[in-house]
Amino acid sequence: MTLDSSMIHEFFDAAQAGDAARLEELMKNHPHLANTANSDGLTPLGYAAHFGQREAVRALLDHNADVNAVSRSKISYIPSNTALHAAISGARNLEVIRLLLARHAKTDLLDSNGHTCLHTAAFHEDNREIIELLIEHSADVNTRTKDGESPLSLAIKQGNHLVAELLREHGALL
């Protein structure tokens, strides 16, 4: 079976649905699928992570999906980002986030908006547990975007007071 757009589409459908068995079956003959972007420039690992599909994420990582690959999103409202960014901005499944971090996902990589994973977590609701996990994995609470925004300033701007308090407890400055 040759690699074509229908196979890639099927692969991404399996990633979204969390169908680890189907992913593994497809990767058996086409191991490079684990790192093949779809027509929108998204990675299968980022896709599975966004939808909170832990077993799909595990299967992809077990087949050498690059945990720190940055997608090349062609969708205007989806930034190019890593699977960790996608997990944090999507389903926010703590098991998926823990798995990515355990497999050495970097917390300091930037998405196309110039945000680290900590910026992304601070921007979205009150993600205290996610913030704690990122800090435990060496996320810099004082990193800034090119526009000077810190995770703390984003949390305050979004009205995420509990996140702002937590960031301050860990030494975040405005």
Image (spheres, grey):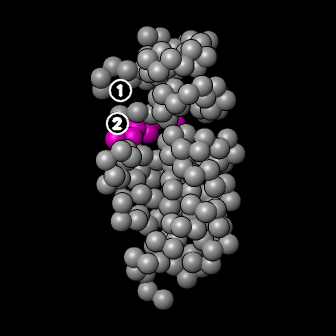
Q: Secondary structure at mark 2?
A: loop
Q: Tell me the residue that label 2 is attached to.
A: 113
Q: Is residue 136 visible?
A: no
Q: Quadrant of residue 38?
A: bottom left
Residue 41, position in %: x, y?
Answer: 36, 59
Residue 71, position in %: x, y?
Answer: 40, 53
Q: CA distance from mark 2 to mark 1?
A: 8 Å
Tell me the quadrant of the picture where the C terminus can be found. top left
Residue lying at 62% horizontally and 78% vertically, measured from the top left: 25
Say whether residue 167 is magenta: no
Q: What is the magenta segment's predominant secondary structure?
A: loop
> Type of residue at label 1?
Thr
Q: Tell me the residue that label 1 is attached to.
A: 145
Q: Are marks 2 and 1 in contact (CB under 8 Å)?
A: yes
Is residue 3 placed above or below 63 in the rendered structure? below
> Type of residue at label 2?
Asn
Residue 73, position in %: x, y?
Answer: 35, 53
Residue 134, position in %: x, y?
Answer: 59, 32
Q: Which residues are magenta?
A: 105-113
